Image (cartoon, rainbow, N blue to C red):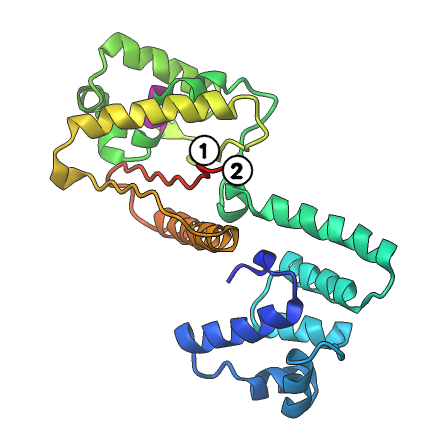
């Protein structure tokens, strides 16, 4: 569960316990959490199901630790607790701004990916404005292509000269290095933040390349899904939250997998009516 989707720390603790008990272990219970917090189960239950009482800072920290929260996630819960306890309107307004800023930052894809964002000191424009440069970089993570550049060029329909140009660009960007044993990757994963001036032209070029590739593939080699549906803003946020959880899972799964082939995943969720 993504703690940054919540504005009420009690809701998160309650629902997180249910989620972990259902999907992780039946040992996640009110009794065990209460014991970790140094309080009675009845008191914990009463606090989490009322608006009038609150856990102490120490108790909330212990509860978050019990659920396996990170340092930043625990700090966010403490901020929610302070917001919920305060009766001073101006103070609550300042806290709400801080909460919204944190939620906005954690609503971005890069917050759910274990990759580095690009270095501003190096010109990466060619990498993000020419999809072939990025695709070639990822292909070089696969040993059979890294060891056989002719096979790589054939797979991507490149001429030898064009492949050489791309390899040169990747070297200049310090993403690969030519050694006596061939090319080695200096960095495999990069991510372009949404506030980069390259983001929107990159997204357009990548989409064009995606459609071009899909048209070449047999149906057995590609899965594509698109739907237009009506719902409300709350549902949209829930769907996006689930995708960000999937994105985090996919990143961890891909990082732990053998580099045997190159894949691409796309997801779009946007508003037609505003």
Quick check: marks 1 and 2 in contact, CB under 8 Å?
A: yes
Question: Which residue is identified by label 2?
Answer: 116
Q: Nearer the viewer, residue 176 or 68?
A: 68
For label 1, the residue is 187
- Residue 136 showing in the rendered view: no
Tag count: 2
Between residues 64 and 80, which one lies in front from this camera angle?
80
Q: Is residue 154 above or below residue 255?
A: above
Work out whether residue 245 can be spotted.
yes
Q: Rounded to the nearest whole Å, what is the CA distance between mark 1 and mark 2?
A: 9 Å
Mark 2 closeness class: few <14, some 14–19, many ≥20 residues within 10 Å: some
Q: Residues within 10 Å of mark 1 (few under 14, many from 20)?
A: some
User: In the image, which residues are magenta?
Assistant: 132-137
Numbered badge on residue 97? none
Q: Residue at x 63, y 70 (%)?
A: 64
Q: Residue 273 appears at what percent x and percent y?
A: 47, 38
Q: Can you give x and y, in whole percent of width and height, for residue 229 in the image?
A: 36, 47
Q: Most prominent secondary structure in the magenta stretch?
A: helix
Is 69 left, or right, of 185 in this rendering?
Answer: right
Q: Position of residue 225 (x, y in %)?
A: 27, 42
Q: Residue at x 27, y 8 (%)?
A: 161
The residue at 77%/76% (across/down) is 56
């Amino acid at each position: 569960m993504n703690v940054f989707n919540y504005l009420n720390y009690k809701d998160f603790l309650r629902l997180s316990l249910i989620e972990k008990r259902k999907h992780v272990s039946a040992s996640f219970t009110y009794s065990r959490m209460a014991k970790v917090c140094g309080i009675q189960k009845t008191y914990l239950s009463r606090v989490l199901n009322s608006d009038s009482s609150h856990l102490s800072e120490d108790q909330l920290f212990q509860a978050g630790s019990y659920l396996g929260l990170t340092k930043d996630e625990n700090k966010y819960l403490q901020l929610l607790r302070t917001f919920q306890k305060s009766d001073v309107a101006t103070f609550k307004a300042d806290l709400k701004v801080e909460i919204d800023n944190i939620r906005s930052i954690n609503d971005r894809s890069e917050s759910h990916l274990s990759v580095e964002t690009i270095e501003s000191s190096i010109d990466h424009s060619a990498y993000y404005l020419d999809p072939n440069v990025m695709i070639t970089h990822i292909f070089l993570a696969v040993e059979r292509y890294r060891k056989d550049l002719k096979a790589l060029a054939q797979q991507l329909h490149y001429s030898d000269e064009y492949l050489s140009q791309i390899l040169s660009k990747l070297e200049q960007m310090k993403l690969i290095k030519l050694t006596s044993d061939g090319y080695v990757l200096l960095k495999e994963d990069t991510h372009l933040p949404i506030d980069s001036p390259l983001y929107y032209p990159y997204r357009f070029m990548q989409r064009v390349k995606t459609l071009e590739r899909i048209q070449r593939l047999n149906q057995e080699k590609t899965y594509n899904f698109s739907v237009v549906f009506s719902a409300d803003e709350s549902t949209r946020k829930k769907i996006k939250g689930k995708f960000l959880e999937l994105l985090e899972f996919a990143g961890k799964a891909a990082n732990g997998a053998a580099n045997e082939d190159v894949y691409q995943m796309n997801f779009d969720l946007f508003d037609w009516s505003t």
